[in-house]
Image (cartoon, rainbow, N blue to C red):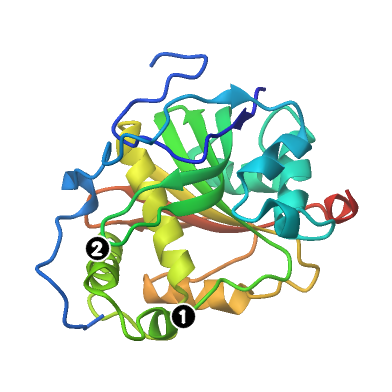
């Protein structure tokens, strides 16, 4: 399996060609749902070119802060070693996906992949974006790696003195996930990382999407934040098992919490 090191930006309007062809808040007028949103290709600086990875160290250059984030025992370095350690999915990730859609071949994995979203200037940057093929077609997966790191600010913190762009994005995220009244206590990162999976599913013309937290924390730190997010969407979080939803746009969305192999913490 070839893993792909990504450029620092991504043209969402293009089909990827890599070895195969193929808040109850006052906000501006609501954007359209995921399936109808046309935001790709918004920057001429976005690259469509991807190059093969030569090993875990290749991933470092694509981090927002390479020198500070590439540390033994932290999520960026740990997840790189985990995904490069075999020719397919890490077994704990595969277990969740295959419970949901059956045996799934990993077609490609892109580290530090950026997905543009409406509102604001920053993309949602997934630790890994993975595309898989199962019996019914493709599945687009965003991976959020964790050790001890939190999921960032809550909605309440993110929306303090919010700009029009932030309000637009929050409204888009809520509509995409079917959240009518967004609670202040859920973590904003979980929202945009999940919607990124839906956007990527549209890019690859599939209705199957997944967002999986790949946790290497022995104590399962921040699982309660994930559990709260799943509850808001109408599900019950279970470690190592898929939680399935139907989204307003008609996507089959799978969420999961995968417990990574602890040996990679020392890599």
**Is 19 placed above or below 179 here?**
above
Which sits in the foreground, 230 or 189?
A: 189
What whole-number distance in Å separates the C-alpha atoms at marks 1 and 2? Answer: 17 Å
Instruction: Count the labels in the image.
Output: 2
Where does residue 252 sit, x and y in percent of width and height? 35, 48
Residue 118 position by quadrant: bottom left
Please tell me whether mark 2 sits on a helix, a strand or a loop: helix
Res 244 visible:
no
The correct choice, above or below, for 77 with respect to 228 in the image is above
Residue 168 as seen in the image, left or right of residue 76: left
Q: Which mark is residue 172?
A: 2
Tag 1 and tag 2, C-beta contact below 8 Å: no
* Identity of the residue drawn at 33% across and 46% down: 199
Q: Which numbered circle lies on residue 154?
A: 1
**Residue 107's disc number:** none
* Relative horizontal placement of residue 104, taking residue 251 as reference (left or right): right
């Amino acid at each position: 399996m070839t893993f792909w090191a990504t450029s620092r930006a991504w043209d969402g309007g293009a089909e990827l060609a890599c070895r195969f062809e193929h808040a109850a808040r006052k906000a501006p007028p609501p954007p359209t749902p995921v399936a109808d949103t046309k935001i790709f290709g918004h920057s001429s600086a976005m690259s469509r070119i991807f190059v093969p990875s030569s090993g875990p160290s290749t991933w470092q250059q694509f981090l927002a802060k390479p020198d500070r984030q590439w540390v033994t025992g932290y999520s960026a370095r740990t997840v790189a070693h985990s995904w490069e350690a075999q020719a397919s999915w890490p077994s704990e990730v595969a277990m969740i996906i295959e419970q949901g859609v059956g045996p799934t071949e990993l077609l490609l994995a892109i580290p530090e992949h950026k997905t543009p979203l409406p509102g604001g200037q920053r993309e949602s940057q997934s630790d890994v974006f993975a595309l898989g093929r199962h019996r019914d077609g493709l599945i687009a997966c965003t991976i959020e790696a964790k050790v001890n790191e939190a999921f960032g600010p809550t909605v309440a913190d993110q929306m303090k003195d919010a700009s029009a762009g932030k309000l637009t994005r929050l409204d888009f995220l809520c509509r995409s996930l079917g959240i009518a009244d967004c609670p202040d206590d859920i973590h904003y990162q979980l929202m945009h990382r999940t919607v990124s999976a839906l956007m990527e599913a549209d890019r690859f013309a599939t209705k199957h999407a997944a967002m999986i937290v790949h946790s290497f924390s022995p104590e399962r730190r921040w699982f309660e934040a994930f559990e709260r997010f799943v509850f808001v969407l109408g599900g019950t979080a279970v470690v190592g098992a898929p939680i399935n939803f139907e989204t307003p746009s008609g996507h089959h969305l799978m969420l999961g919490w995968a417990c990574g192999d602890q040996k990679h913490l020392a890599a």
